[in-house]
Amino acid sequence: MYDEDIEPGGASKFLKRGNWAFSSTGDFMDDGDITDIYILGNSSKLTMANPELYMTARLSPLSFTYYAFCLGNGPYKINLHFAEIKFTNDNTYNSLGRRVFDIYIQGELVEKDFNIADEAGGVGMGVIKNYSVVVNNNALEIRFYWAGKGTTGIPDRGVYGPLISAISIHPDFKPPSENGSSVSVREVVGIVAVGAFVLFLVLGILWWKGCLGQKSRMGQDLRGLDLQTGLFTLRQIRAATNNFDISNKVGEGGFGSVYKGLLSDGTTIAISDFGLAKLDEEDNSHMSTRIAGTYGYMAPEYAMRGYLTDKVDVYSFGVVTLEIVRGRSNTSHRPKEEPFNLLDWAHLLKEEGNLIKLVDPRLGSDYSKEEAMVMIHVALLCTNVSSAARPTMSSVVSMLEGNIIVPDLVSDMSLLHDEMKAKELQKYYQINEEINMSERTRRTMSMDGTWTATSSSAADLYPISLDSGLLENRF
């Protein structure tokens, strides 16, 4: 179905109707007629298909342009219908006329010196020119322009210029349906299938990396232990232990006293760690009434001020991690002198850019340097002087497993200001390395002898030869 264009043209005319617009430029000034004709009509019989499309034609002395709006972006097929209905095909003077013009689509020249009669094989015959074009801005422009070629006065003046009978535009893609959806059922099924596959793949990767299923495995382990846990108020605990009566005290360790208690249902309980916090029901203070623990492993805020938080355990974990890397105790006691601390040496090596020197020298090269550096960096993060700067234990685990990146370290400037202590640390650990090397040499030379291993102590891990002169330089 076509929309008929019957609007009269003019020397300068613009008209918009629906999703179409039309503009015309030019005037037949040499025809001697005040009223110019911009629509030609045919009075003879036409024999081509759909002759009604060619009974009239739009004409302009210079140019005219058609615009199509509200088109979906994409490829389109454009059909331009032409028929020369002004000239004749006989031996009269009317047969000498020639109509030549150019055609532009979307601003690009698609036909130069186009002659309707030549393309159709004669006058009064139809010809359809097909073009493919891509619409990007939801609009289409088709322009016809006379470049001054052809005849201007045969058979009459004022019959030259571009001419068009009909225009049809067809999308070369599946247009959206009336409800706004252009996706078929088959495409929807395909999209859902691909999405499900991608989701399954992602979940599989997360499970393989251990990010999934940890909570369920933990729950199974706890159920296997047949644990019965619950929450008890301070009032219940006081009643169970007779207000922590000394007769109910069953022992005392590095982390406080242990009391035996009897609940109202007859359950016997053991309560410990009450030496670490005040028993205050109102403000639940985290200030310790008695410091409990091993020096060298306690966080500064707890050891000096008795301030207890979850970051205290993080600090202790960092110290133990350094001990694992180094293979020796954190604190080395020296009578009548300040003890040396492994953590202080680690910070010193950090500033020197030589943290790898922390690794147990007995390992030689039989270890992963990358994994060792990760452990050292995590340990230094855990032992930060500021509790707020320490990571949580969940973050520590993620860093050690390689799931998250280990952040940069902040230097401990307090150690760097003590130059004398730094030199003493370097000397001390250098001496210990020489002692270890000497002991390993002695063991290598006596490998042929028989020996038996029994339970080991901290001294067994780092044996020192009593005959070595280096021992005197340790203190």
Image (tube, rainbow, N blue to C red):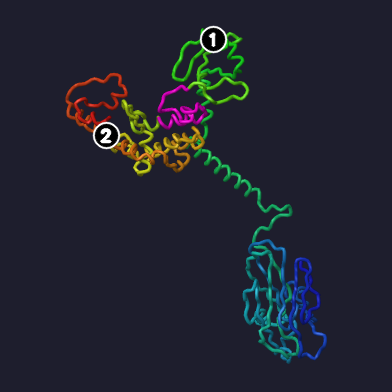
Q: Position of residue 388 (x, y in %)?
A: 51, 36
**Type of amino acid under label 2:** Glu
Gap between marks 2 and 1, in whole Å?
52 Å
Q: Looking at the rendered structure, which numbered label has been put on residue 245?
A: 1
Secondary structure category for the residue under label 2: helix
The correct choice, above or below, for 274 with respect to 310 in the image is: above
Residue at the location (57% across, 9% down)?
242
Is residue 292 shown in magenta? yes
Quick check: marks 2 and 1 in contact, CB under 8 Å? no
Q: Which residues are magenta?
A: 291-319
The correct choice, above or below, for 213 with respect to 419 in the image is: above
Residue at the location (76% across, 80% down)?
12
Residue at the location (41% across, 26% down)?
295
Structural crowding at the residue carrying mark 2, measured as other residues with C-alpha within 10 Å and reported as few (<14), some (14–19) or many (≥20): some
Q: Position of residue 282 (x, y in %)?
A: 63, 23
Circle nearer the N terminus (2, 1): 1
Secondary structure category for the residue under label 1: loop
Q: Nearer the viewer, residue 151 or 239?
A: 239
Task: Indicate left or right for 111 with 35 as reference.
Answer: left
Q: Nearer the viewer, residue 205 or 414?
A: 414
Q: Position of residue 458 (x, y in %)?
A: 32, 24
Q: Nearer the viewer, residue 331 or 209?
A: 331
**Type of amino acid under label 1:** Asp
Q: Is residue 118 visible?
A: yes
Task: Indicate left or right for 23 with 115 as reference.
Answer: right
Badge 2 is on which residue?
433
The correct choice, above or below, for 204 with respect to 316 in the image is: below
Q: Is residue 156 visible?
A: no
Task: Indicate left or right for 128 with 216 as reference.
Answer: right
Q: Looking at the rendered structure, which numbered label has been put on residue 438?
A: none
